[in-house]
Amino acid sequence: MVKAIEIAYQKGWRKLWLECDSILVVQAFKSDKLVPWQRKNRGLNVVAMSKSMVFIVGHIYCEGNTCAYRLASHDINLQKFCWWEFTPTFVSRFFVLVKQDLPCNRFS
């Protein structure tokens, strides 16, 4: 997630909506005291970047975001960082369903 915010900032994207299944991460954007000391420098830099954006961060249960679940499951097998310019084929079916406000779940 930190990497995603850094990339968005570098690409000049100034509107970012982040959904996360970790309440602690969501709260860390509201209080920097929750950022672990090992990640403090990078964490504070990302928080500063987010303040120069139209930035929304919210909590969502992992079952509520099928695309994110599929991407995260796929990412487990990757050996290096991967960036897609277009929706990957393994999530495109779910992306279409979500975009049309149709029901889908991670077990579909």
Image: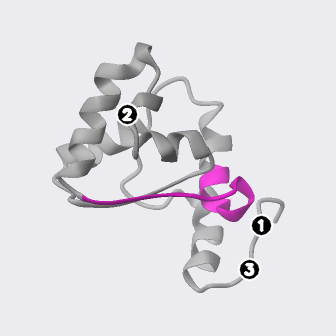
Inspect the image, locate mark 1, and give the three-letter code of the amino acid beneath it. Answer: Asn
Helix, strand or loop at label 3? It is loop
State how far apart marks 3 and 2 are (Cα): 36 Å
Circle 3 residue:
103
Q: Where 64 falls versus 50 (above or below)?
A: below
**Residue 44 image-quadrant placement:** top left
Residues 31 and 60: in front is: 31
State how far apart marks 3 and 1 are (Cα): 7 Å
Tell me which segment is drawn in magenta: 54-70
Nearest to viewer (mark 3 / mark 2):
2
- How many neighbours does mark 2 have within 10 angstroms: few (below 14), some (14-19), or many (20 or more)? few
Circle 1 residue:
105
Helix, strand or loop at label 1? It is loop
Helix, strand or loop at label 2? It is helix
- State which quarter of the image contains the N terminus: top left
What residue is at 29 percent from the left and 40 percent from the top?
47
Q: Are marks 3 and 1 in contact (CB under 8 Å)?
A: yes
In the picture, the disc for residue 32 is: 2
Inspect the image, locate mark 3, and give the three-letter code of the amino acid beneath it. Answer: Pro
Of labels 2 and 1, earlier in sequence is: 2
Left or right of 84? Residue 70 is right
Task: Count the marks.
Answer: 3
Query: How far across and down, in percent of the image, does residue 80 sit?
Result: 47, 25
Query: How far across and down, in percent of the image, does residue 53 sit?
Result: 22, 57
- State which quarter of the image contains the C terminus: bottom right
Query: How far across and down, in percent of the image, does residue 72 sit?
Result: 62, 43
